[in-house]
Image (cartoon, rainbow, N blue to C red):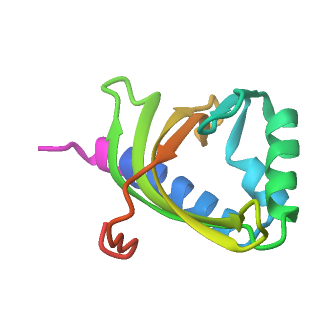
Amino acid sequence: MRSRLENEDRAAVLAADRGWAAAARDKDLDRSVSYMADDAMMLPPAGATVVGKVAIREYMASAFATPGFSVTWEPGETVVAAGADFAYTHARSVYTFPGPDGTIQTVHAKGIAIWRKNTDGQWRCVVDIWNDAPSPDINLDSE
C-alpha cells in the first residue's frame, strides 16, 4: 500500500510527464525544454546521445521544425524510488516524420524517462531513452 507522500510524488511525476507530452505535442520548445534537468541526456534510437539542456534544446528545435514531425505519448507505469528523489515512467509513443522519399511515416516507440526531484521540489527529466516498438494497434488513451 502506498503512503500519502508516495501517492503525491507519483502524481507529481505523472503531471510533469503529461505536461511535457502536451508541450511536445504542441511543439512548444520552451515549455518542452523546461521539463529537462540542466544535466539531462536523451538517447534517441540509432543516434548519438544528446547531453545537456542546450544540446537538447537544439535537438528538439530541429525535430519541431521538421515538416510533418509530430510526437504523442502518455506515461503509463510510474515508479518512485523509496527515497522519493528519483522516479521513472514508461510510455508508448507515436512519431510522424518525413521518410527518405518525403512521405510521412508513422513509427511506434516505447521508452523510459528517469526523473529527479530537484531541491526546489520540482521533478525534471534526467534521462530519456526510447526505441522502436512493434506496430500493433497502440491506443495511447488506454494506458
Residue 128 pos. (x, y %) = 57, 38
Is 37 on the left-hand or right-hand side of 19? right
Instruction: Give the magenta range.
Output: 1-8
Residue 52 shown left or right of residue 114 in the figure = right
Q: Quadrant of residue 11?
A: bottom left
Q: Horizontal and vertical percent for residue 19?
A: 60, 62
Q: Position of residue 14 (x, y in %)?
A: 44, 55
Residue at position x 85%, y 34% from top? 55
Provide the major secondary structure of the magenta segment: helix
User: Between residues 96 and 72, which one lies in front from this camera angle?
Assistant: 96
Side (left or right) of 70 relative to 65: left
Q: Is residue 128 or residue 125 the one in the foreground? A: 128
Please give the name of the residue rendered at 71% of the width and 63% of the height, measured from the top-left corner: 99
Residue 77 vertical placement versus 95 (above, below) = above
Q: Is residue 66 above or below residue 117?
A: below
Q: Is residue 4 magenta?
A: yes
- Quadrant containing the N terminus is top left
Closer-to-camera residue (41/130): 130
45 in magenta: no
Q: Quadrant of the C terminus?
A: bottom left
